[in-house]
């Protein structure tokens, strides 16, 4: 399906600080993001033609099984217009954005909203961690787990590298993915730690980040273990937060009185779902295929990209996605990270926001938070973490697991105007 020839723009974007917000309600976080995005776009609720709400935990953690978007929006002043609820695991926010863009391309409206919000830090931590167990085929959970953990066979964890604390089984899967990459390409734990140290260093300059403490590579390696080769700073935390993006057509920008000066053009937006590929077929990875499609739609290639925000629920994720996005060859992500290629000032800065490891990971808001960062960068408004002269940026956001890869991946490319 080809995209409309009419240009679509991000007119406004905003996010809350991601982190632990025990004193704040879900709708309060959502309201802050909404007001920020509307103010940034220079428009009002009345200007919105459709709204897409991204949320994963409303049902399991707050008991709002149905119409979470309508309920949240009713509390923050959005009503009457079409409201759609979007759940695509960790890719929910980016999926909501994709659908908002599609609504403009279809001509149903000229201004639309994508908003994601989560309240994951609840009193029952085990209940919160159990949310992740729904991110695969629950009828085959044990079979899934055995298959995915087997990816790491052949790499023996050193003594003392396994935590005795209960974590989501997804951490064991992330670790198995690390070990598979290690035995296939020679990637080292130190290279993975270099990604984590880099992202924590970037987060120091991000006022919206959950963690703002720098770590050296040695400090990351010496941190409490999760499961080999992952240590605590290499992994995304449970987060509360919200983010919102207002998109508009050319006509929409004119109607709300917004000029193109600060608007950021959506050069491509692509969603792909899993395929039954073999583990030894990285060129068929969902993220790689989505990136190739996005580049083709945008009419550019990896060498034209100035910065990226990618899904690093663990530090290994950044290495894999750097390869999928074509910044380096398959297997070269680890050495590139260790050289500083992905650091601010390096060849292709990745996750200048701090990434999920540092900025936080409130599932439904995560992808929209990534978009906020890229919009800020392309406007030249990122302060101490600014990538100089940024003109093109790419985002990758994945969710769930089916087979040996994500259930859904969204890749968006943005261009400065």
Image: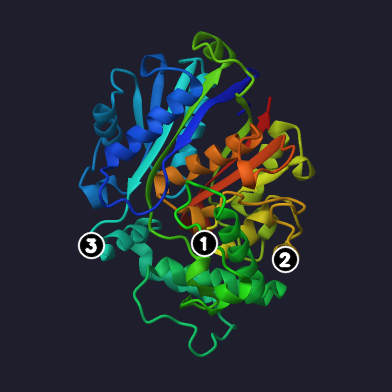
Mark number for residue 285? none
Position of 100 relative to 353 (above/below): above
Is residue 308 rendered to the left or right of residue 27? right
Q: Which SS class for mark 1?
A: loop
- Tell me the residue that label 3 is attached to: 124
Q: CA distance from mark 2 to mark 1?
A: 29 Å
Dot 2: within a 10 Å radius of its alpha carbon, few (fewer than 14), some, or many (20 or more) residues?
some
- Tell me the residue that label 1 is attached to: 213
- Tell me the residue that label 2 is attached to: 331
Q: Nearer the viewer, mark 2 or mark 1?
A: 1
Quarter holding the C terminus is top right
The quarter holding residue 142 reads bottom left
* Spot occupied by residue 179 in the image (x, y as percentages of width and height): 59, 75
Q: Residue at x 52, y 63 (%)?
A: 314
* Spot occupied by residue 296 in the image (x, y as percentages of width and height): 72, 36
Question: Is disc 3 in contact with disc 2, using a CB cutoff of under 8 Å?
Answer: no
Q: CA distance from mark 3 to mark 2?
A: 40 Å
What colour-coding does the image apply? Answer: rainbow
* Spot occupied by residue 328 in the image (x, y as percentages of width and height): 76, 57
Q: CA distance from mark 1 to mark 3?
A: 27 Å
Q: Which SS class for mark 3?
A: loop
Question: Is disc 1 in contact with disc 3, using a CB cutoff of under 8 Å?
Answer: no
| Residue 244 seen in this snapshot | yes
| Residue 147 seen in this snapshot | no
Dot 1: within a 10 Å radius of its alpha carbon, few (fewer than 14), some, or many (20 or more) residues?
some
Dot 3: within a 10 Å radius of its alpha carbon, few (fewer than 14), some, or many (20 or more) residues?
few
* Spot occupied by residue 234 in the image (x, y as percentages of width and height): 53, 67
Q: Earlier in the sequence, mark 2 or mark 1?
A: 1
């Amino acid at each position: 399906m080809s995209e409309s020839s009419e240009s679509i723009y991000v007119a406004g974007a905003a996010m809350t600080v991601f982190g632990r917000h025990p004193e704040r309600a879900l709708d309060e976080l959502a309201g802050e993001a909404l007001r920020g995005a509307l103010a940034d776009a220079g428009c009002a609720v009345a200007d919105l033609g459709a709204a897409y709400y991204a949320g994963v935990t409303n049902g399991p953690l707050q008991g709002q099984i149905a119409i979470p978007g309508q309920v949240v929006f009713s509390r923050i002043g959005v009503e009457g217009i079409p409201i759609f609820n979007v759940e695509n695991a960790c890719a929910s926010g980016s999926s909501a954005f994709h659908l908002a863009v599609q609504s403009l391309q279809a001509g149903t409206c000229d201004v639309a909203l994508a908003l994601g919000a989560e309240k994951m830090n609840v009193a029952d931590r085990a209940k919160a961690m159990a949310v992740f167990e729904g991110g695969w085929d629950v009828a085959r959970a044990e079979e899934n787990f055995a298959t995915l953990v087997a990816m790491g066979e052949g790499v023996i964890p050193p003594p003392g590298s396994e935590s005795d604390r209960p974590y989501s089984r997804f951490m064991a899967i992330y670790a198995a993915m690390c070990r598979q990459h290690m035995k296939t390409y020679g990637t080292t734990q130190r290279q993975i730690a270099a990604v984590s140290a880099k992202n924590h260093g970037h987060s120091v300059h991000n006022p919206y980040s959950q963690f703002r403490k720098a770590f050296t590579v040695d400090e990351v390696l010496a941190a409490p273990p999760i499961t080999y080769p992952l240590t605590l700073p290499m992994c995304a935390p449970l987060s509360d937060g919200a983010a919102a993006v207002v998109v508009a057509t050319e006509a929409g920008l004119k109607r709300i009185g917004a000029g193109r000066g600060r608007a950021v053009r959506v050069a491509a937006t692509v969603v792909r779902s899993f395929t039954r590929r073999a583990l030894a077929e990285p060129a068929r990875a969902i993220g790689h295929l989505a990136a190739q499609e996005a580049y083709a739609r945008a009419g550019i290639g990896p060498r034209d990209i100035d910065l990226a925000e990618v899904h690093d629920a663990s530090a290994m994720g950044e290495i894999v996605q750097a390869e999928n996005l074509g910044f380096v060859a398959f297997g070269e992500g680890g050495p590139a990270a260790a050289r500083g290629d992905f650091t601010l000032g390096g060849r292709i800065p990745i996750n200048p926001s701090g990434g999920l490891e540092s900025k936080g990971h409130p599932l439904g808001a995560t992808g929209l938070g990534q978009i906020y960062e890229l919009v800020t960068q392309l406007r030249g408004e990122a302060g101490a973490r600014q990538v100089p002269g940024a003109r093109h940026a790419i985002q990758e956001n994945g969710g769930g697991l089916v087979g040996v890869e994500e259930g859904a991946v969204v890749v968006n490319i943005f261009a400065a105007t």
